[in-house]
Each structure stands twice: as structure tokens, then as C-alpha cells.
Image (spheres, rainbow, N blue to C red):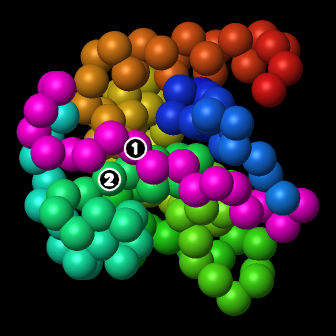
Amino acid sequence: AGIGQVESHHGTYRGATIAPNGDVTPPIRGVRLDGTGGTLRIVDNDAGNMDGDGGVERAMGPMQFISETWRLYGVDANNDGKVSPDNIDDAALSAAGYLCWRGKDLATPRGWITALRAYNNSGVYLRAVRDWATAYAAGHPL
């Protein structure tokens, strides 16, 4: 839940809404990953088919996946026959799978930090997610 809050305010970033089937509209897209403004430069590898940008990657959906990671870890959580980074159910379950795969044992501090660093290798990001996860564990509403 901490990642969902930091990445997209749980799918409501910039006024986006979540339909009963989990689809988020309008689609949430991150900044262009063009190497400026502290971003990594990640050249587009799918002619913009997923993120709408044929030059460089943009993170997609409420959990902010880049297209290559989505192709590897994306799942159809709501059983609608589509694997969509713009569906909060698909994105949340895909993020959980990615975190478990990358962090191995999320019950340990080392595993948790390893997983978060794989998701976004930033100390500021890690602290923000930790703070939100701690707040949620203490009963803060989503």
C-alpha cells in the first residue's frame, strides 16, 4: 500500500478515477525517462505501444511500471482476459509478484529493502514508502 500511495495516490493521481472493474482513467503516465531531471535514460523498446511514447520509456499505471518490466511481471488479477498496467487490480498483484521475486523474503528487513530498491533505487523513495507502510500498519486509512 505504501508503494501505491507514493506512485499514484492509489490510482487517483491528478484526478484519475477507478472503475468498478479496476480500470484507471485517464491512464496515469510518469515523466519521460529521458535522462533529465534526475531520471535514468531508458530508450523505448516497443515503439510506444504501451506507454504512448516512441522515444523513451514512461512509467505506466497506478503502480508505475515501465513496459519491459510489465511484460515480464504483469498479470491479469481481475480475470477479464487483459493484462493491463492501467488496471489497479492487475497492477497491484503484478507489483506484489515483482517485489517477492526481487526481494525474495519480504518478511526480513533486508528482503524488503532489496525489493524496494529494485522497484525504485532511491533513498528518498524508500523512506516515503516505509513511512506510508508504517502509517497503514498503525491503522491510517487508505
35 shown above or below 43: above
Residue 12 appears in the rendering = yes
Asked where in the image residue 71 lies, by quadrant, the reply is bottom left
Amino acid type of the residue tagged 2 in the rendering: Arg
132 shown above or below 68: above
Left or right: residue 34 compared with residue 4: left
Residue numbers of the magenta segment: 20-38
Is mark 1 in CB contact (under 8 Å) with mark 2? Answer: yes
Amino acid type of the residue tagged 1 in the rendering: Gly
Left or right: residue 102 compared with residue 38: right
Who's the residue at 69% across and 88% down the image? 81
Left or right: residue 48 compared with residue 125: left
Who's the residue at 18% across and 58% down the image? 56
Q: Identify the mark at residue 62; answer none if there is no mark.
A: none
Asked where in the image residue 60 lies, by quadrant, the reply is bottom left
91 shown above or below 14: below
Quadrant containing the N terminus is: top right
Residue 28 lies in magenta, yes or no?
A: yes
Who's the residue at 81% across and 14% down the image? 140
Who's the residue at 80% across and 26% down the image? 142
**Residue on which disc 1 sits:** 30
Residue 75 picture location, percent across and down = 57, 73
- Is 84 or 33 nearer to us in this picture? 33
Q: Secondary structure at mark 2?
A: strand
